[in-house]
């Protein structure tokens, strides 16, 4: 089950989610037998919830939430949320302590993993925490929470203060990534719109789109682009359908510019602003831009 969890998480998590590392362990036989005896368990395969365990370390708390959602959606096992830091913080908002999301996961059917048969119902404990939460846990687990002697109050206070700082840092980093994703989404939205225009009015995009190149141009010219730029480009190309035919003809040239969605954007930009050549960020495509000017019957000013 541990191997299944690790593999599924690494394959399924989205590209925005940063899984830093995963570790796992199986409880030692002697330790398991000792616990069964101490607890008086009569059905240890069910009652022992820590026979197997896996821990996923992510970068941010938003990644913890995403990985938890993926785990809960997996149909081959049942899950029980045994510890939720969000609920703990809501119940005691003034306290800063160990944070980690814990699940008890049980396979619905018998599985064979790496030659080992795992019976149905066997419990695997899954812990999901951020890198900062993991650092805190490693620091305080043995030295404070499982200390054999009395822990100085100052040490406990400093540990709580460090968690408060870590929680603040996580919040700021999550907000940073949210703003970056929103900014990236606006660029991707324009690129997607231009790609749709190119596919529907010029030619199917059977060649790989140079996403980095297209995004660079869009980002560099963002101040020149209105919110409804793709609608304007589409209307302009429809009203001047000879331009689409020109691009189709130029596709056979050696210049890869004509295979990219930004080629349709270039026509609208030049028509909208004759000074586009002085703002165009790609020096290597100036010859193609000269053709855009020529097709529109506009004189290209020196760059």
Image (cartoon, rainbow, N blue to C red):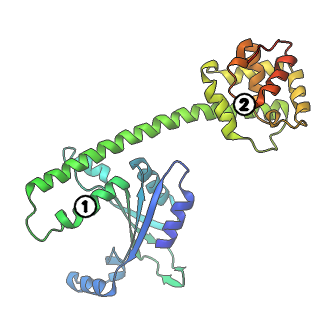
- Measure the alpha-carbon separation of dots 1 and 2: 51 Å
Q: Is residue 273 visible?
A: no
Q: Foreground: 95 or 294? A: 294
Relative side of 66 to 246, left or right: left
Q: Classify mark 2: residues with Cα within 10 Å, few (<14), some (14-19) or many (20+).
A: many
In this rendering, is residue 110 above or below 5? below
Quadrant position of the C terminus in the picture: top right
Label 1 belongs to which residue? 139
Lower sequence index among marks 1 and 2: 1
Circle 2 SS class: helix
At mark 1, the secondary structure is helix
Q: Observer-nearest residue: 118 or 170?
A: 170
Q: In which quarter of the view is residue 129 placed?
A: bottom left
Spot occupied by residue 43 in the image (x, y as percentages of width and height): 32, 83
Percent x, y of residue 64: 41, 53
The residue shown at (54%, 64%) is 8
Q: Residues within 10 Å of mark 1 (few under 14, many from 20)?
A: few
Residue 219: x, y in percent? 61, 29
| Left or right: 250 as drawn, with respect to 67 | right
In percent of width and height, residue 261 lies at: 75, 33
Figure check: 245 above or below 154: above
- The structure residue drawn at horizontal position 44% and vertical position 65%, both measured from the top left corner, is 22
**Count of labels in the image:** 2
User: What residue is pinned by disc 2?
Assistant: 194
Q: Taking 125 as reference, is 134 above or below it? A: above
């Amino acid at each position: 089950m541990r191997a299944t969890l690790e593999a599924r998480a690494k394959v399924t998590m989205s590209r925005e989610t940063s899984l830093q590392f995963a570790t796992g362990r199986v409880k030692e036989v002697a330790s398991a037998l000792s616990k069964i005896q101490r607890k008086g368990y009569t059905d240890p395969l069910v009652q022992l919830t820590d026979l197997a365990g896996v821990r996923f370390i992510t970068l941010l708390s938003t990644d913890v939430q995403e990985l938890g959602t993926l785990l809960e959606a997996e149909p081959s096992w049942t899950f029980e949320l045994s510890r939720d830091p969000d609920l703990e913080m809501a119940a005691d908002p003034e306290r800063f302590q160990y944070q980690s999301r814990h699940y008890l996961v049980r396979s619905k059917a018998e599985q064979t993993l790496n030659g080992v048969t795992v019976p149905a119902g066997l419990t695997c404990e899954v812990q999901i925490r951020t890198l900062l939460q993991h650092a805190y846990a490693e620091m305080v687990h043995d030295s404070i929470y499982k200390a054999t002697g009395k822990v100085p109050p100052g040490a406990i206070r400093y540990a709580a203060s460090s968690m408060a700082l870590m929680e603040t840092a996580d919040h700021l980093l999550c907000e940073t990534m949210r703003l970056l994703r929103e900014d990236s989404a606006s660029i991707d939205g324009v690129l997607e719109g231009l790609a749709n225009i190119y596919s529907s009015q010029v030619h199917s995009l059977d060649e790989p789109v140079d996403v980095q190149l297209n995004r660079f141009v869009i980002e560099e010219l963002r101040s020149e682009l209105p919110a409804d730029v793709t609608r304007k480009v589409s209307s302009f190309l429809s009203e001047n359908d000879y331009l689409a035919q020109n691009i189709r003809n130029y596709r056979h040239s050696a210049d890869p510019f004509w295979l990219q969605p930004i080629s349709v954007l270039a026509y609208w930009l030049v028509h909208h602003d004759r000074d586009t050549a002085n703002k165009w960020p790609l020096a290597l495509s100036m010859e193609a831009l000269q053709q855009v000017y020529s097709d529109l019957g506009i004189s290209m000013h020196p760059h």
